[in-house]
Amino acid sequence: MQHISLGTLDVSRIGLGAMTMAGVYTSEGGLDDAESIDTIHRALDLGVTHIDTAEVYGPFHSEELVGKAVEGRRDQVVIATKFGNLAWRDGRPELALNSRPDTIRVAIEGSLRRLRTDHVDLYYQHRVDPDTPIEDVAGAVGELIAEGKVLHFGLSEASAGTIRRAHAVTPVSALQTEYSLWSRDLEDEILPVLRELGIGLVPYSPLGHGLLTGQIRSVDDFAPDDWRRTNPRFTGENFTRNLALVDEVRAIGSEIGATPAQTALAWILSRGNDIAPIPGTRRVARVEENIGADAVELSADQLDRLNSLTPASGARHDEANMARVDG
């Protein structure tokens, strides 16, 4: 597995996202923790060094799984986790933006305990909190870095202006945001800022929430409680148009013996040596397929064809979730 740098942090250029291991796409009864742990172990065996999770996944379940899976192999793994999407009410977690410095202190202690470690390699603000100045957030994480509890600072779904302000207080190593063949908005403004400042990019949902795997052809492929049923890109005429994009990716992949997922990931990898996607899965077979993209080489003509694909139809999130993205 080839490696790249996120700022000064060395990671495998394909990582593993552990969100789905907490049931984000699947109801609780459909989870298999043993299978998720096997998937993490297989990823490590294949050279993945970058595992991504967050306190809100579950909440807490994904972090607990990652902690259990990497115990005894901690020195092989860059663990990334996130804060700022949970608040506490009457001793119970609830989904809410909260990045106050005192909350960050509570969050890191919980994450360290669940991850069974004394430090987090990459600590992201999960969503920008409009009620807490980003300078205060960066300062609080900077204190954790000074104490050795965090090694690198990251932001998620932050605007170019927010990135600059945070970086001026505590160096930002990585930005995590959605980036794929069907979500390229950041190329105009955010990506140039990242490269100006020496910040790496960690694309989440690099396979378009599963659509770019080529395995999804209808909303009937989703469980009844799967949130993608209400995502604008999976509904109505948008879905039909977006399936045509997948068919083009499949056709290009077939020319070199690659799956649609491998083709889509290979395209991301071609965009620069400062980009490390984290395709999420809880299946061993899927992690093996995704990591196979490391060996896929696309010709100049194939890259041109992928670059010229029609952009995805529909907003990438519903209104409520887009409102949580820093504008």
Image (cartoon, rainbow, N blue to C red):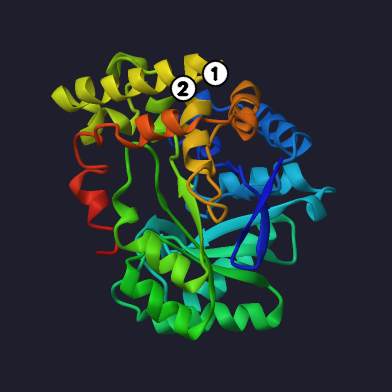
Element under disc 1 = helix
Which residue is rendered at x = 32% and y = 33% of the image?
227
Which residue is rendered at x = 43% and y = 34% of the image?
303
Mark 1 vs mark 2: give the one in front: 1
Residue 273 left/right relative to 93: right
Amino acid at the residue labelled 1: Ile
> With respect to residue 159, does 205 lie above or below?
above
Which of the numbered marks, if any, corresponds to residue 256?
1
Q: Quadrant of residue 86?
A: bottom left
Amino acid at the residue labelled 2: Pro
Point out the image quarter for the N terminus.
top right
**Contact between labelled residues 2 and 1, with CB atoms less than 8 Å apart:** no
> With respect to residue 214, does 10 lie above or below?
below
Point out the image quarter for the C terminus.
bottom left
Can residue 105 be seen from the camera position used here?
Answer: yes
Which of the numbered marks, if any, corresponds to residue 221?
none
In this rendered view, identify the residue nearer to me: 290 or 256: 256
Residue 14 left/right relative to 316: right
Marks 1/2: CA–CA distance: 11 Å
> With respect to residue 255, does 46 lie above or below?
below
Element under disc 2 = helix
Can residue 101 be seen from the camera position used here?
Answer: no
The x and y percentages for residue 283 are 60, 25
The x and y percentages for residue 202 are 50, 53
Q: Quadrant of residue 164?
A: bottom left
The x and y percentages for residue 18 are 57, 42
Q: Residue furthest front?
A: 301
The residue singled out by tag 2 in the image is 260
Which residue is rendered at x = 73% and y = 31% of the image?
42
